[in-house]
Image (cartoon, helix red, strand yellow):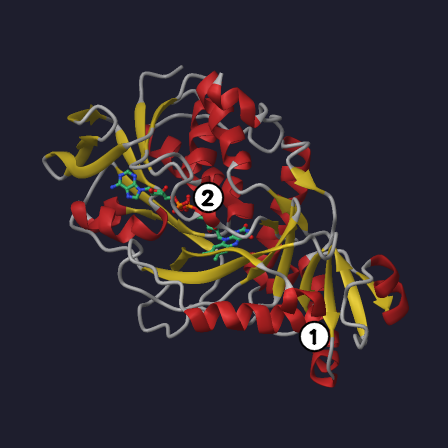
């Protein structure tokens, strides 16, 4: 292991995958997380292992990232996914008119598809709207939002990383204009802490802008919340999407014995204060039931909101217009050495985000250490607590 120490701020999907990547490259890593690991956006996401088909027409870069990572994750995290596939269902003539663009987009981004007739789709999923016109099968899957990042963290810990939950960063430590560590509050022991580091990575998701400000730099991150509604009953086995331009309430993910309908999209200033508007819950029911009529009567188990850390400008109105791809920022470009930010992406693409970030980190540290996370099989999530 090299003598270099990197502190990662944020124990979500991105920070977890980055800890794994850097430890495999021989870097000493500490992850500091202000709450429990995955307590930010990651632990509250839909649980969809994206095939990328949702983004194939409007956001092809993100679609390519999703299908590539979907394939890699199945290999390195066996047992973490239901290999249930997804269906994009066309219900109206307008949906049908989108079919050609959708198929072209999937072909161009490398997403495998199989078109099913109405009868074939209903044979696979009898609870779908019987008026559907056709469906397209894609390699979506269901995952547990917490357990996949736990596997990254478990493997990172096994390789020497330290993970410090309930450690909130409130300040960056400077040596001149270079970031040389973090300072903050250990909420578990109710005391302050300081960690020195050769480099600090800001992987704070929708809070990344706040952390960047501690260094006096800006990152263009837009916190864009969405509401998810879990209802009783596993009404389909596959992930069900509406065959149209991505919109509200057009994905239903079966999770254990529940179905999770999502989502909506708006933009906020503060990711710590998210409403769950009643009208969004109603909209999830309404839109979900267009695809699976039984959802209309299904009792609600829970509704919650989480904020996407999207890359873009605050001029965005709903967040839907912003890409789901990701970006890494070397703040040396603004005169602050030793400080890197990674934002955007999806839980599905966290490994790729980590690879690009770790490539930059090792280059900055002067190490010659290639990425190995495409091949190394992750430890089970239970190893995190061992
Ligand atoms: C409604 C919704 C549904 C989604 N569904 C899916 C899906 O089905 N599939 C998919 O692939 N993606 C999905 N996404 C996207 C995905 O959830 C996010 O892209 C991903 O979880 C972001 O991970 P992250 O690690 O970058 O951010 P986070 O998970 O938010 O991690 C950042 C962490 O930083 C911590 N932190 C903040 N400030 C500090 C501080 N001062 N000190 C220490 N720690 C700090 C936070 O507590 C947090 O845990 C969804 C997003 C939303 C909003």
Label 1 within 8 A of ligand 1 by Cβ: no
Residue at the (73%, 82%) spot, across then down: 92
Mark in the foreground, 2 or 1? 2
Disc 2 or 1, which lies upstream in sequence?
Answer: 2
Q: Residue at x 63, y 38 (%)?
A: 73
Q: CA distance from mark 2 to mark 1?
A: 33 Å
10 Å crowding of disc 1: few (<14), some (14-19), many (20+) = some
Where residue 281 appears, x then y in whole percent? 49, 67
Disc sitting over residue 43 in the figure: 2
Q: Residues within 10 Å of mark 2 (few under 14, many from 20)?
A: many
Give residue 319's quadrant in the image.
Answer: bottom left
Q: Residue at x 31, y 59 (%)?
A: 220
Q: Secondary structure at mark 2?
A: helix
Ligand 1 closer than 8 Å to label 2 CB? yes
Q: Position of residue 265 (x, y in %)?
A: 45, 67
Q: Residue at x 82, y 62 (%)?
A: 126
Question: In the figure, 166 relative to 321: above or below?
Answer: above
Q: Nearer the viewer, residue 254 or 157?
A: 254
Residue 338, disc: none
Along the viewing direction, whichever of 276 and 311 lies nearer the viewer: 276
- Residue wearing tag 1: 101
Q: From the viewer's perspective, is 372 left or right of 316?
A: right
Q: Position of residue 290 (x, y in %)?
A: 67, 74
Q: Quadrant of residue 298?
A: bottom right
Asked if 233 appears above or below 28 in the picture, the reply is below
């Amino acid at each position: 292991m090299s003598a270099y120490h990197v502190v990662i701020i944020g124990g979500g999907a991105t920070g977890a995958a980055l800890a794994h990547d850097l430890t495999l490259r021989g870097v000493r890593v500490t992850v500091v997380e202000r709450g429990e690991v995955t307590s930010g956006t990651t632990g509250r996401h839909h649980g969809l292992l994206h095939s990328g088909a949702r983004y194939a027409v409007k956001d092809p870069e993100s679609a390519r990232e999703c299908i590539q990572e979907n394939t890699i994750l199945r290999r390195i995290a066996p047992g973490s996914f239901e290999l249930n596939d997804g269906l994009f269902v066309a219900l109206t003539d307008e949906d049908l008119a989108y079919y050609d663009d959708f198929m072209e987009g999937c072909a161009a981004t490398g997403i495998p598809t199989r078109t099913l007739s109405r009868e074939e789709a209903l044979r696979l999923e009898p609870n779908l709207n019987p008026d559907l016109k056709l469906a397209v099968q894609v390699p979506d899957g269901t995952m547990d939002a917490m357990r996949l990042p736990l596997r990254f963290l478990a493997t990172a810990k096994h390789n020497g990383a330290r993970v410090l939950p309930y450690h909130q960063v409130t300040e960056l430590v400077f040596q001149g204009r270079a970031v040389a560590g973090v300072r903050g509050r250990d909420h578990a022991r109710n005391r302050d802490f300081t960690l020195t580091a050769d480099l600090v990575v800001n992987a704070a998701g929708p809070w990344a802008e706040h952390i960047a400000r501690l260094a006096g730099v800006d990152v263009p991150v837009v916190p864009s919340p969405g509401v998810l509604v879990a209802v009783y009953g596993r009404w389909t086995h596959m992930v069900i999407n509406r065959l149209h331009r991505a919109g509200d309430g057009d994905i239903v993910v079966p999770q254990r014995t529940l179905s999770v309908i999502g989502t909506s999209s708006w933009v906020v200033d503060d990711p710590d204060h998210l409403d769950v508007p009643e009208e969004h819950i109603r909209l999830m029911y309404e839109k979900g039931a267009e695809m699976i009529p039984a959802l209309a009567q299904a009792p609600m188990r829970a509704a919650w909101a989480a904020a996407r850390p999207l890359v873009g400008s605050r001029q965005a109105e709903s967040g839907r217009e912003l890409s789901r791809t990701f970006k890494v920022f070397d703040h040396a470009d603004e005169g602050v050495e030793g400080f890197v930010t990674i934002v955007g992406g999806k839980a599905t693409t966290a490994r790729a985000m980590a690879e690009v970030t770790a490539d930059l980190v090792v280059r900055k540290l002067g190490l010659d250490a290639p990425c190995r996370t495409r091949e190394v099989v992750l430890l089970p999530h239970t190893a995190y607590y061992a």
